[in-house]
Amino acid sequence: MADDWKPGDLALCVADRLPAPRDKPTKLLKVGRVYNVTSVRWSYGEQCVAIGLAEVQSRGPFKDWHACIFRKIDPLTDEERDSFLADLRQPAPLVEA
C-alpha cells in the first residue's frame, strides 16, 4: 500500500478535496490538522488507499478518506519522545548582540 499506512499512524491533512474538478471541499477536514488513523483498506472502485480516522468520518459508505489528501506522520518511539522532551528542558543558549 502507498506509504504503508497502518492503524496508529498520524495523518496530516494537506488538502480538503480530492484532486478532481467535480469534487467539492469538505467542511469536515481541516488542512494542517493531524488525525489518528484507525483503519486502512484498498478501495478497488477508487483504485486508492483509504484510511479511517478517529476524529471524523467521511460521508461515504465506508466512512473513510482517500489517503492522497494526507501525509503520513510516523508516531515517535518512546526513546524519540524522551529525547525530544529532554531537548526542550535544556536552557536556551544566550545570543549576544
Image (cartoon, rainbow, N blue to C red):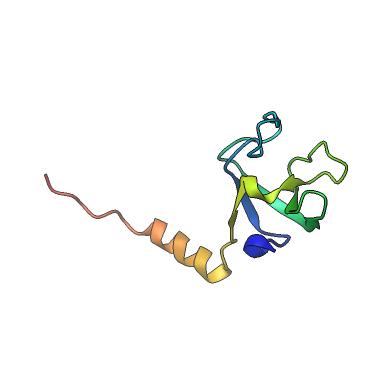
Residue 8, horizontal then vertical, whole percent: 70, 60
Side (left or right) of 16 relative to 97: right
Residue in the image at 64% along x and 49% along y: 68
Residue at point 50%, 67% (across, down): 80
Image coords of residue 32 (percent x, y) = 55, 40
User: Split into 4 quadrants, where in the image is the C terminus?
Assistant: top left
**Most extreme residue toward the left, as rendered?**
97
Q: In the shown orientation, is residue 23 left or right of residue 59?
A: left
In the image, 76 versus 97, the foreground residue is 76
54 vs 16: above or below: below
**Residue 86, quarter of the rendered image:** bottom left
Q: How many numbered marks have been drawn onto this rendered protein structure?
A: 0
In front here: 45 or 84? 45
Q: Residue at x 67, y 36 (%)?
A: 29
Q: Above or below — where is 33 with respect to 43?
A: above
x, y percentage for residue 61?
88, 42
Q: Quadrant of residue 18?
A: top right
18 in relation to 26, above or below:
below
